[in-house]
Image: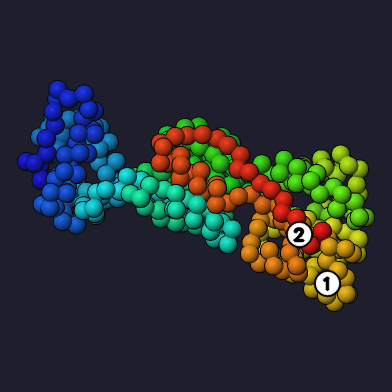
Amino acid sequence: MLEHLKINPESKVPKYIQLVDTIVDYITSGNAQISDRIPSVKNISDKLGLSRETVFKALNILSEKGIITSSNTKGYFITKVNTSIQHRVFFMLDKMTSFKERIYDGLRFNLDKNSEVDIFFHHGNKKVFRSLIVENINSYTHFVISTFFNEDVSDVLNLIPDGKLILIDQKEHGILTQHSQIYQNFENDIFESLSKVSSEIKKYEEICLVAPLTAPHKTSVMKGFKKYCSFVGTKSSTIDHTEIDEIKKGILYILISEKNDDLVKIIKFCRKNNYNLGKEIGVISYNETQLKEILEGGITVISTDFFKMGQRAAELINNNETGSEENPSEIIIRASI
């Protein structure tokens, strides 16, 4: 391969881009096969009169696009002869749910056709989170990540180079690199949503926010909840979801857990005691699903547009842009209130 690589010193095109192009030209010419070894950084540097830094920069771009891979002891090897891939996206969630799958759909359906997406999960484990990012730091052009930790992970996120990080769902602070964020404003969303159904809320004696102690967004939701209750002067309470066994008539329950356990408990209680959901007991749940649309005549939900969240991430990648914006949320009113 080495003898086929060429650089034009007079060209205005940066030398590392020229090196990327000449390697790609060689691979697409049909002369290369998967697992073929790329010449060493030293050999390329000596042959073309380039600095090692320039060579590394070019090889990193090829690695990000999945065209080559590196071995610490053996050098670089060709992993793909289809070099048309422009964007290779590292997509990481805490876990997969039906509504988070909508983020994935919004992302992959709206990326340019010459793009690839690989999905990873950190399960709320910072050690796993760090390991996955460190191991793949040079293998992707973009990192689309939902954190949802109860601890600061900015030290890990700051490892990702400028312009490559897109944070989704939960807003993060302390990021020093150039990045994007598409996030939910949990405090404002619950305040605005409850304000739209104040007339329905009036028939209940009390509003109870059921918030798991471990929910990363609990604090923000609680601020908006207390702000609304103070504003309208309604009786309110907050309990952990482990305390929801004591379900009472005349209360509107707001459920923010990603699981449906709390919702199932309330529905079973209503059926056992012949209470009508939406009259004697009310429920507002978080995050829209098809099940909530049909269950008990329909469960009222506060939900962001998860598909749009993924779509906006794709648009930032396609257009090579960065930005920070709130993702829109709405309350979908159904029979449960």
Residue closest to the eye, 275 or 22: 275
Q: Residues within 10 Å of mark 1 (few under 14, many from 20)?
A: some
Direction bottom: furthest residue:
272
Residue at 54%, 56% in the rendered image = 102
Residue at 66%, 41% in the rendered image = 185
Q: Position of residue 302 (x, y in %)?
A: 71, 52
* Residue annotated with mark 1: 269
Q: Are marks 1 and 2 in contact (CB under 8 Å)?
A: no
Mark 2 residue type: Arg
Question: Residue 50 lies in what quarter of the image?
Answer: top left
Residue closest to the eye, 188 or 93: 188
Rendered image: mark on residue 239: none
Q: Position of residue 103 (x, y in %)?
A: 53, 53
Residue at 75%, 67% in the rendered image = 297
Q: Is residue 47 above or below residue 269?
A: above
Q: Is residue 212 left or right of residue 29?
A: right
Q: Is residue 234 left or right of residue 288?
A: right
Q: Secondary structure at mark 2?
A: loop
Q: Residues within 10 Å of mark 2 (few under 14, many from 20)?
A: some
Q: Secondary structure at mark 1?
A: helix
Residue closest to the eye, 79 or 198: 198
Marks 1 and 2 sit apart, C-alpha to C-alpha, by 19 Å
* Residue annotated with mark 2: 334
Mark 1 residue type: Phe
Would residue 66 be seen by someone viewing this image from the given angle?
yes
Residue at 23%, 33% in the rendered image = 16
Q: Position of residue 64 (x, y in %)?
A: 32, 45
